[in-house]
Image (spheres, rainbow, N blue to C red):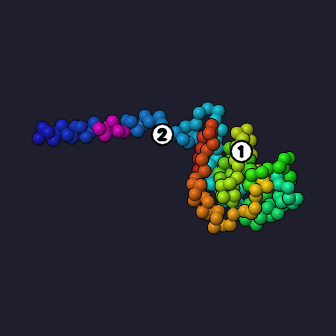
Amino acid sequence: MRALVVVGLLAVLALVFVIVAMVRDTQGKAGTAAGCPKGWPLADVTLREPKDVKINVYNGTDEVGRAGSVADDFRNRKFQVKKVGNAPKAVDEVAVLRFGPKGVGSAHLLRAYFLDNAEQQYDAKRTDDTVDVILGNAFQQLATTTEVNQSLGDLGSPEAPTGTCPTSEKDK
């Protein structure tokens, strides 16, 4: 009987200890906007639908009119194309994606359209949610729907860049 009382008392103490530890947990909001160090930008890691992604398409190739034809391809895939033009300098890569904290999830989706062969250039000071797509000389074509879906599976979920805190639509 006495052993039963001791075991019961130990169980109650263990339960109280667990509850106190959970209530006082200082890491409960780690990795979220609520646990973000002061001054760090919030990176929107929401994976968007193409219809919700704003892009500018720039030609960094030797081929005249390339940005216009690729912009049309993006429009046909329901992206919001804002600007089309020429890049100030040539790009040798497949593409370069330039974006700020509000464009992290959008840039992640766009990576899949280039089969993760686009260079990413994150700018913490950029305040809009538009992604600049600079086409390079190694670019051939956008991925098919099937290839995009496979690439998204390989890429996994969007991640906040170093020095930022992840946030998403549900956090707002």
- Residue at 69% x, 47% y is 120
Q: Nearer the viewer, residue 118 or 20?
A: 118
Please name the residue that numbered disc 1 is placed on: 121
Q: Does the magenta-highlighted stretch encompass residue 49?
A: no
Image side of residue 170 versus residue 66, left or right: left
- Residue at 39% x, 36% y is 21
Give the residue type that dot 2 points to. Gly
Q: Is residue 149 visible?
A: yes
Closer to the chain start, of discs 1 and 2, is 2
Image side of residue 40 versus residue 130, left or right: left
Give the residue type that dot 1 points to. Gln
**Which disc is residue 28 wearing?**
2
Q: Nearer the viewer, residue 10 or 114?
A: 114
Q: Is residue 78 visible?
A: no
Report which quarter residue 136 is drawn in: bottom right
Which element carries disc 2, helix, strand or loop? loop
Image side of residue 22 versus residue 130, left or right: left
The magenta segment is 14-19
